Amino acid sequence: MTITRRDALAGASAAVAALALPGGATAHEPPPAFVTREGTRLMRHGKPYRIVGANLWYAAWLGADAEFGDRARLLRELDRLKALGINNLRIMAAAEEGPLRNSIKPGFTRADGLENPALFEGLDFALAAIAERRMTAVLVLSNFWEWSGGLQTIQWRATGRFIDMGDPAHPWPAFADATAAAYANPQVVALYLLHVRALLARRNSVTGTRYADDPAIMSWQLANEPRPGGSDAAIAANRAAYLAWIAKTAEVIRAIAPHQLVSLGQEGTQATNGDGALVAEAHAAVDYVTAHIWPLNWSWVRGDDLEGTWPEGKRKVEAYIAAHVAIAEALGKPLLIEEFGFPRDGEAYAPGVATTFREAYYRTIYDAVETSWSTGGVIGGSNFWAWNGEARAAHPDARFRDGDRAYMGDPPHEPQGWYGVFDSDAAMHRVIRAHAALAAATA
């Protein structure tokens, strides 16, 4: 290669600029407080950053200084999670109000398309509290599913049409196929990116830090479980638009927030009807691979016979993990198991019911993570679904109703208490705490 005078001058200028930066870092190197990726490892402060995480989708709602908020409870929940050894929280940073039957209200975006300042300020408060506890957050920028409005509601704003998940007039996979049409609709994508850019440019009202400069934000996540469709035909038809949406959004985020990671939020091959090649393509433009694992939802176990079905369910869980390890290895990127949930014994919802098989399931996930940590593998950590904390179901049928304020990890379309971990679940706490202690001891 021939080096020109221009190249030499550029190199000299870069060297001078590097000397002017703290610690001799170059302009392209993030400060050490940011979580970064080095090959298949996540790093922070110069050493591997092992994710011992939880899902806390409702953090911004509790953080709001409004009738629907409860800042005191949010601080209590964060303190409980910190005491368990949790260092990373996956939270919703988007919700769209509209006509969908089971979507949470209020949202970050009102039905008229205007922002709801109270929720943005709630997110500010939550991020400040997370940073104060030396934790990090994954901010989820939309949702494929209906419970926070998501892409289906953004399509309604753009087109006036919508489909409710579970509507008998539109059986599966109609909802998934209709939602996946969002990626090819320029108006829908523009509305989606409007919210993304607003968050990237936002300055935290509590800390004064611009979101794009905040090391407490580990990752910007494109959406919760974005799928290219539900039917094979829709997946094939939407493939190009889906991949283009991922690449475009990642490009937008990196241009404004180059020090923070970008993630997709996909379940893995369950989202592509088994197409591992599409999972790999979908993660080519982001920083790490994500996998979600739901044995009951995917009929790998039966809630009324966990004892009889768990052994085969466990084998399927382990095979699913192995398949996504292989994808991450081929891409040379970390893998995070960022959602995994399991019912209580007998598929009960009340916090007093035993968690025998849930404990076994968590240990299965944690065993895979810990083995990866000890062998230098690609699994960087996990986030259990989800933290219920001190919340309790407000109604005897354990169903969420508009106006309820006892937010918990089970979102509003699901039975309250189905998968979440309560503050009283001592046996579950022991499992989580032991995993976190091992992460701290071997980091």
Image (cartoon, grey):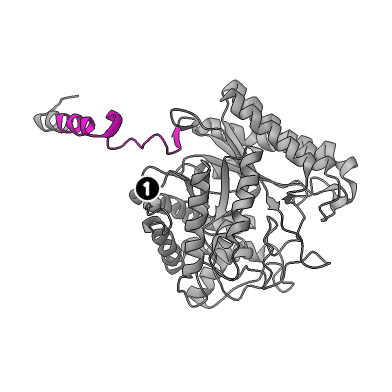
Q: In this orientation, which residue lies closer to the viewer: 282 or 141?
A: 141
Q: Is residue 82 left or right of residue 11?
A: right
Please give left or right for residue 284 compared with residue 378 in the image: left
Does 18 appear in magenta? yes
As rendered, which of 300 and 72 lies closer to the eye? Answer: 72
Most distant residue in the top direction: 375
- Tell me the crowding category of disc 1: few under 14, some 14 to 19, or many 20 or more residues within 10 angstroms, Cα based: some
- In the image, taking residue 35 as reference, residue 81 lies left or right, namely right
Please name the amino acid that badge 1 sits on: Asp
Q: Position of residue 95 (x, y in %)?
A: 55, 65
Q: Quadrant of residue 31?
A: top left
Q: Find residue 113 and report its horizontal and vertical position in percent.
A: 47, 74
Element on which disc 1 rests: helix
Residue 35 horizontal/vertical position (percent)? 45, 38
For the point 23% across and 31% down, the residue is 18
Figure check: 130 above or below 111: above
Can residue 272 be seen here? no
* Residue 146 within the segment the image draws in magenta: no
Residue 383 seen anywhere in this rendered image of the structure: yes
Query: In which image quadrant can residue 176 be found?
Result: bottom right
Residue at position x 85%, y 54% in the image: 348
Where's residue 290, x and y in %? 57, 43
Question: Which residue is found at the position 42% from the left and 37% from the top?
Answer: 33
**In the foreground, 390 or 335:** 390
Tally the numbered discs.
1
Q: Which residues are magenta?
A: 11-37
Instruction: Answer above or below: position of 84 versus 127.
Output: above
Dot 1 corresponds to which residue? 213
Image quarter in which the N terminus is found: top left
Q: Quarter-wise, where is residue 68 in the image?
A: bottom right
- Looking at the rendered image, the quarter that the C terminus falls into is top right
